[in-house]
Amino acid sequence: MIRSARLAAIVLGSAALVGTAALPATATDAHTLPATHRSPIVIGAVQADSPGRDDGSNRSLNAEWVTVKNTGLRPVNLKGWTLTSRSTHKKYHFKNLRLAGHQSVRVHTGHGRDTIHDVYQDRRDYVWHNQRDTATLRNDHRRIIDTKHWGRR
């Protein structure tokens, strides 16, 4: 009985050593892959369906918005970045907007005066589909930075 217990302990100890030896190899392999750079800029909350009746008024258009936020500490200039709707193919081009660390900006559909907290696409029709759409944020090199889906795909 003691011999069986000792044999079981040796087998279990050997298995643990083999498992431990395998872990660093796996971790090392993962580190040899190219690291993806994650941007601190992300798409936040989306209000694709303006409250109330869609009457096409500027008030209704501006109640449709997408939030873009900087989750990092450093400021990022969004000049040349774009925000696009997959369903309508409408694209908003950011002007010279510096988004400070932990700051967000709402991109409204209608007309208005741009501030550091709200920018306006100056459109006369809706951009985002209520039931299903995808917002895509690209940087000034046309690389996809973030996407946000809603509804059924």
Image (tube, helix red, strand yellow):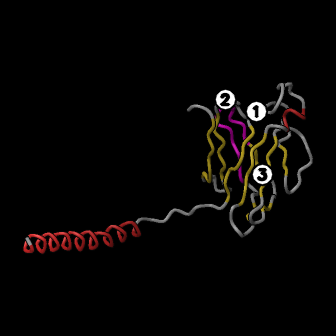
Does 20 appear above or below 57?
below
Residue 91, located in which quarter of the rendered image? top right
The disc label shown at residue 8, or none: none
Amino acid carrying mark 2 in the image:
Gln
The residue indicated by pointer 2 is 131
Does 60 appear above or below 26?
above
The residue indicated by pointer 1 is 49
Measuring 76% from the left and 57% from the top, which residue is drawn there?
79
Circle nearer the N terminus (2, 3)? 3
Label 3, secondary structure: give it.
loop
Q: Which stretch appears magenta?
A: 81-91
Measuring 76% from the left and 48% from the top, which residue is drawn there?
93
Do callouts 2 and 3 mark residues in contact (Cβ within 8 Å)?
Answer: no
Residue 14 image offset from top left, x and y in percent: 18, 73
Mark 3 surroundings within 10 Å by alpha-carbon count, few (fewer than 14), some (14 through 19), many (20 or more): many
Residue 143 image offset from top left, x and y in percent: 60, 53
Amino acid carrying mark 1 in the image:
Asp
The residue indicated by pointer 3 is 94
Mark 1 surroundings within 10 Å by alpha-carbon count, few (fewer than 14), some (14 through 19), many (20 or more): some
Amino acid carrying mark 3 in the image:
Phe
Circle nearer the N terminus (2, 1)? 1
In-image side of 121 versus 84 (left or right) = right
Name the foreground residue: 123 vs 107. 107
Residue 52 image offset from top left, x and y in percent: 83, 28
